[in-house]
Amino acid sequence: MIVNDDFLLTAGEIAVGKREIDYRNAISRAYYFAYHEGSKYQHLCPGIAHLVIRGGYHERLIQRYLQFTANDKAVALGYVLQDMRNKREAADYYLSDNVNARDAQIQIKTARTLQSRFASFFDASSVPHKSA
């Protein structure tokens, strides 16, 4: 059975390749790692379940964080996810764009950072909020 860490492990393995397709695939795998990390914690963004969020699973997940305006850190996590998704879409769909090893390494590093930010932000007991 695959676990989420397998996405990031695979991204790292293929990012050392020499072909542009390797870098594109590494960016994609790094994004899917980040997406699944965000999915693990989305239930901890209270107060927005009543909102109608259009789009697919990925858009709804990102919007869940972006609309959790009671907490700046949750919103920041949403923006990172959104940026990673945009880079994944560019890697997957815009073949005329140049993608290189540095692009792949940045996305892998961003995914690792995002993992620790999710874990430290959403501790097991509470979600911090802005004071009124």
Image: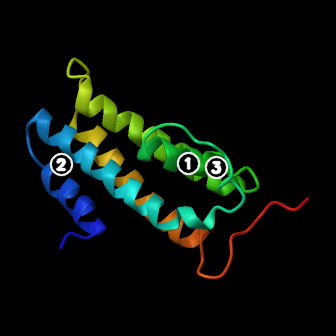
Badge 1: residue crowd in 10 Å (few <14, some 14–19, many ≥20) = many
The residue pinned by badge 3 equals: 75
Instruction: State the separation of the CA atoms marked 3 and 1.
Output: 5 Å
User: Can see residue 99?
Assistant: no
> 110 or 126: nearer the eye?
126
Confirm or deny contact between disc 3 and disc 1 (CB under 8 A).
Answer: yes
Q: Tell me the element at label 2.
A: helix
Relative to 25, 127 lies left or right? right
Q: Is residue 123 above or below residue 38?
A: below
Badge 2: residue crowd in 10 Å (few <14, some 14–19, many ≥20) = many
Which amino acid type is marked by label 3?
Val
Q: Residue at x 24, y 24 (%)?
A: 98
Which amino acid type is marked by label 1?
Gly
Using the image, tell me which numbered label, if any, was put on residue 25: none
Which amino acid type is marked by label 2?
Ala
Instruction: State the separation of the CA atoms marked 3 and 2.
Output: 29 Å
Instruction: State the separation of the CA atoms marked 2 and 1.
Output: 25 Å
The residue pinned by badge 1 equals: 78
Using the image, tell me which numbered label, if any, was put on residue 15: 2
Nearer-N-terminus badge (3/2)? 2
The chosen color scheme is rainbow
Q: Residue at x 35, y 46 (%)?
A: 106
